[in-house]
Amino acid sequence: MKKILLSLTLISTFCIGQIPVGYYNSAQGLTGNPLKIALHSIIDNHTQVSYNGLWTAYKKTDRKSNGKVWDMYSDIPTGTPPYQFTFTTDECGNYSIEGDCYNREHTWPQSWFNSVSGPVSDLFHVYPTDGKVNGYRSNYPYGNVGVTSINTLNGSKLGACSNLGYNQTVFEPIDEYKGDLARTYFYMSTRYYSEDAGWSTSAATNKSTILPWQVNVLLQWHHQDPVSAKEIARNDSIYYKFQNNRNPFIDHPEWADSIWTIDASVFVKELELQHSFSVFPNPSSSSFQILNKSNSQKPVTLKITSISGELIEEKIISLQESVSINCENWAMGIYIINVSSEQSVSNIKFVRQ
């Protein structure tokens, strides 16, 4: 969330002052995956709040100065929110329009981790939000919307993604809360690193690993919307009153770049090579075509792998204008279609639905 009244210096001073002495000692001086592993060891085994206990916790972690619920899907920090919720009395319940009630929004959707214990009630990613907008968001990834299908009352949007590497439906919160949600995802990927055996995959994640296109979005949001006083206070409240762990990327925003920037830059480089071939339809449940957009019709190597790296098919083919691939027997999920020749390489994400 953007800082409205507090300077970066004040925010940083306040933030550092709340971190327990020595809390991050084992992570100092590390970068990349070693840093992620060290942070995981620091913040794992947190005290779990019950799912029902979230209602009570929100009164401490997500309370505005006026005593109302701090809902990032309806709040307008620089203006007047369209509605505000009262704790307890406005808990969902049924809803039909915005403003009816607030519920518990899993920003990392439950279907992505199969509702396993731990993340299902982790306060660092389960926020109080308007029920109707929560329903709009559903289990769509976060992203920047190009063509909007739904506008919410505070300016959040649902629609087709405009980011490189993904063109399906995404949910875009207002600018003031994009950084909050980016750092939420960095926390989730780190907290549950190596503890995600029961998790599923999604268009944005492979278990607890954030896919490169989504990393690009989140790093952009992370930089555009720096850490706010709201996040710092929430981080402290969760640590001292409930879970006894912290979000490292609120305490040390620079660590997000240390861990994920390399992955993001490699992804952009790969995208620049994706000019020769495309896949249609995508997603598909039965078959798809690899369309040749180059002038060459020389043999190429086709390699298809699952998002986890399992080899599905590899062969040399001769491309004319297109080639058809049957995917009826593939499991639902994300696949990487690699088409390579001596001159170029194209890596295309395909979704079997």
Image (cartoon, rainbow, N blue to C red):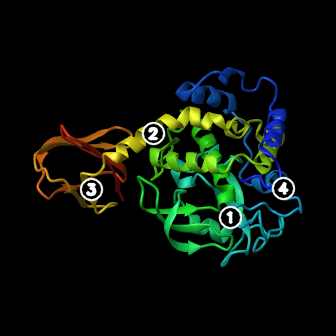
> Which residue is disc 4 drawn over?
59
Q: Mark 4 belongs to which amino acid?
A: Lys
Mark 1, Cα crowd under 10 Å, few <14 / some 14-19 / many 20+, is many
Q: Earlier in the sequence, mark 4 or mark 2?
A: 4
What secondary structure is found at the residue carrying circle 3?
A: strand
Q: Is residue 56 left or right of residue 260?
A: right
- The x, y position of residue 58, in whole percent, is 79, 55
Q: Is residue 254 left or right of residue 80?
A: left
**Real-space Cα separation, disc 4 to disc 3, in angstroms:** 50 Å
Q: Mark 3 belongs to which amino acid?
A: Ser
**Residue 134 picture quarter:** bottom right
Q: Where residue 73 is drawn, which disc sits there?
A: 1
Can you name the residue that lies furthest to the right here?
66
- The x, y position of residue 109, in whole percent, is 57, 54
Question: Which one is nearer the viewer's eye here, 348 or 343?
Answer: 343
Q: Earlier in the sequence, mark 1 or mark 3?
A: 1
Residues at circles 1 and 3 in contact by the CB criterion of under 8 Å:
no
Residue plotted at (82% across, 44% down): 237
Number of numbered labels in the structure image: 4
> Which residue is disc 3 drawn over?
278
Mark 2, Cα crowd under 10 Å, few <14 / some 14-19 / many 20+, is some
Residues at circles 4 and 2 in contact by the CB criterion of under 8 Å:
no
Question: Which one is nearer the viewer's eye here, 82 or 41?
Answer: 82
Residue plotted at (77% across, 43% down): 8
What secondary structure is found at the residue carrying circle 4?
A: helix
Mark 4, Cα crowd under 10 Å, few <14 / some 14-19 / many 20+, is some
**Real-space Cα separation, disc 1 to disc 3, in angstroms:** 35 Å
Is residue 128 visible to us here?
yes
Mark 1 or 4: in front is 1
